Amino acid sequence: MIRVADAGLLTTVQDAGRWGCQHLGVPVAGPMDPLSHRTANLLVGNPADRAALEVTLVGPDLEFLDDTVFAVAGARFDLRLDGKPMRSGVAARAGWGSRLRFGRRTAGARAYVAVRGGVDVPLRLGSRSTDLASRFGGLGGRPLRSGDRLDVGPAVAAPVPRPRPDPAFPLPAGGARVRFMPGADPERFEDGELERLAEYRFTVGPDSNRMGYRLQGPAIGLADPAPVLSSATPPGTIQVPPAGHPILLMADRQTTGGYAVLGTVITADLGVAGQLAPGDWIAFDACGQREAAAALAESERRLTASVPSAGRGAAGVAGAGRAGAAR
Amino acid sequence: MVGAVSGGAGPAREWRIRFVGDAAVALEFEPRIDPRVNARVVAAAARVAAGRHAGVRDIVPSYHAVTVYFDPVRGDAGRVRAALEEAAPAPAEGADASREVVIPVRYGGAGGPDLEEVAAFAGCPAGEVVRRHAATVYRVYMVGYLHGFAYLGAVDPRIAMPRRPTPRLAVPAGSVGIAGGQTGVYPTAAPGGWRLIGRTAVRMFDAERDPPGLVGPGDRVRFEPMPAGVPTAGARA
């Protein structure tokens, strides 16, 4: 069990998302940076889709009430385990009463804390993810609060893999360029707007959240401001309401939308977008399906290289904390 | 080939298949709110679902499109595309469920604060708005926006008042609203701009129920006015 001594700014339980229910109007939710979420799970020997904690901008203070193997991946924070500095991107062992404290954030926006066995909250419609917009799933459909206690699932059979040095993926520093595949209706935008898009730089607005980022900056010229017929909205959809200020749809997005769509951010760059914070800049580069597939293959290759599949020995656990204190 | 989607279809192909990003493929018919178009959508979605293709994560029907999500790492984009190609000509006939769901509504009063406004829009008494709203058998075109929010159409043009210029911050669960040619029931409390004309105690969505949604695309829905003073059995707390 884990006691939440301090919940931080916005910490939620997320597995790989509530897939299979969008036809019911149920959003997918899941991690904002799916790649870092998977990385954290793989580091502790979990299947990649186990429920972990998503930490946002200001991290929590967690007390482990059992011997627990855990790992942090994604955004960089000044991490302390029982007062001693620890790295992200490696599995560590915490004993009874061990304290994991998130200090100053140095890069990225969202970190993932995976525990061996996964965070155990009730399955709702097949998933443990917290959908904040619908107040559904996770722990009571809400962010963690100080004083919450989280159960840990039964340990998985796979050993903790030995990570390679510095497995971290690059994190955006103040902003990022992301690639997108253009939508099918360029005629909905003013002439040349798609071509000019690469020159535009937007700022992630202060009213952004897990549903989406409101992008401040140039207004996109719509040739036809009439609403389009509502249809499905994949993660990374760049939609443009009549006023022209784009919204980048993220994890908690609604299942359908009726705004004009510029395009869809590719899977390989979704995690990069998920590491942006309000105030960061974002710019978009159009790409094709082949480039999207190549980028995804490269990102998978790096994940496999940094976290070799379990089975190469269980020596990857750093000996931090008061391991075994409860025994 | 197959027949045109609608009488007005041009010489172009009657559907297109396209990638929506690198993890979803959409089959799109003619972009219009039309029961014949939507029946094609329902038929194609059912055919893709029946194929139980590996790596498919979600099949989302909407007014004129079926969007299939797949795992871009393990899934096979080409196979998903082929499945949609194969499903596109699925005949609309017989694809719709023959289900008709009746939803009892208490019109007006606290649950329907916009009924008088809609009456003013229509230039008729409130009772006539109720009569017209309840006289139509609606088609469920799609589910979206909220858990179990079903988009129903088509509303009698006389009472088809457009949505409010400024949405309400909180619309109570069970509220029955009109937005132009569409009508629907808010399954949960949510912000919303539809004109609220009544309220029902029927639960449109329950995650613990199987299936969780009361209605799905292709179903028919009818509203039944409840006399004032009759308790709404099963009302949510």
Image: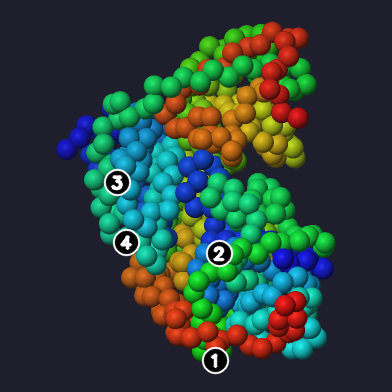
Question: Which residue position holds label 3?
Answer: B51
Residue at the disc numbered 2: A50
A325 or A200: nearer the viewer: A325
Residue A306: x %, y % from top left? 49, 84
Mark 3 lies on a secondary structure that is loop
Q: Residues within 10 Å of mark 2 (few under 14, many from 20)?
A: many
Mark 4 and mark 3 on one chain: yes
Residue at image x 47%, y 32%?
Answer: B216
Query: Does dot 1 land on a helix, a strand or a loop?
Result: loop
Query: Residue A296 appears at what percent x and percent y?
Result: 41, 73
- Up the image or down, B88 lies above or below B215; here it is below
First-in-chain label (2 vs 1) = 2
Residue type for callout 2: Arg
Badge 2 vs badge 1, beta-carbon distance below 8 Å: no
**Could you say which disc has been placed on residue A165 in the image?**
1
Q: Position of residue B177 (x, y in %)?
A: 63, 26
Residue found 74% across the figure and 37% down from its top = B170
Which of the 4 quarters of the picture holds residue A139? bottom right
Q: Is residue B163 left or right of residue A45?
A: right
Chain holding disc 2? A
Amino acid on which the number 3 mark rests in the picture? Gly
Asked which secondary structure carries label 4, the reply is loop
Query: What residue do we see at 56% from left, 83% from top?
Result: A168
- How far apart marks 4 and 3 lie (CA) works out to 14 Å
Q: Residues within 10 Å of mark 1 (few under 14, many from 20)?
A: few
Please name the residue that numbered disc 4 is placed on. B76
**Separation of residues labelled 4 and 2 (CA atoms):** 23 Å
Residue type at mark 1?
Pro
State how far apart marks 2 and 1 are (Cα). 23 Å
